[in-house]
Amino acid sequence: MAQAGRPDTRSMTCAQAQELVRKSGSIVLTTGQSTFDRFVANGSYCRPQTGQVRAKFAPTRDNPQCSVGYRCFQNRTQR
């Protein structure tokens, strides 16, 4: 029940999911029947830990590998 309010990438087009991340800056989206993930629009949403990002993909209504946004990434050698 708790995930009923979380947007689901599978019900959106790729462009809609990308726009939602861009407008939100940082958002948790449902990506599968029992999976979810945090997406960010850019590295400023990863601070103070890191400002580095990597592309994050999720299935959407029109693209099984849509580049929805980014995930925060920390290089373990630079901690």
Image (cartoon, rainbow, N blue to C red):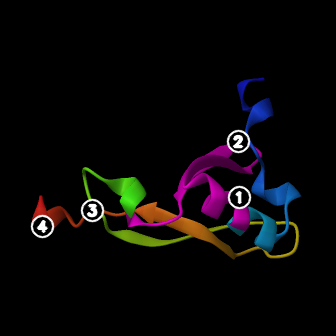
Q: Secondary structure at mark 3?
A: loop
Q: Are marks 3 and 1 in contact (CB under 8 Å)?
A: no
Sequence-wise first label, 4 or 1: 1
At 46% across and 66% down in the image, what residue appears? 42
Q: Which residue is mark 3?
A: 74
Say above or below: 25 vs 66.
above
Question: In the rendered view of the protein, which quadrant contains the C terminus?
Answer: bottom left
Decide: few, some or many residues near mark 4? Use Cα within 10 Å; few <14, some 14-19, many ≥20.
few
Q: Are marks 1 and 2 in contact (CB under 8 Å)?
A: no
At 70% across and 58% down in the image, what residue appears? 20
Q: Which residue is mark 2?
A: 34
At 72% across and 25% down in the image, what residue appears? 2
Sequence-wise first label, 3 or 1: 1
Say above or below: 14 vs 11.
below
Say above or below: 53 vs 2.
below
Asked if residue 23 is among those painted magenta in the image, a careful observer would answer: yes
**How far separated are the C-alphas under marks 3 and 2?**
26 Å
Q: Which residue is mark 4?
A: 77
Q: Which residue is mark 1?
A: 20
Q: Position of residue 17 (x, y in %)?
A: 74, 63
The answer to which quarter of the image holds residue 54 is bottom left
Task: Please name the amino acid that badge 3 sits on.
Answer: Gln
Task: Please name the amino acid that badge 4 sits on.
Answer: Thr
3 vs 2, front mark: 3
**How far separated are the C-alphas under marks 3 and 4?**
9 Å
Instruction: Locate residue 51 relative to residue 38 in the image: left or right.
Output: left
Task: Please name the amino acid that badge 2 sits on.
Answer: Ser
Q: Position of residue 69 (x, y in %)?
A: 58, 68
Decide: few, some or many residues near mark 2? Use Cα within 10 Å; few <14, some 14-19, many ≥20.
few
What is the magenta range? 19-43
Q: Secondary structure at mark 2?
A: loop
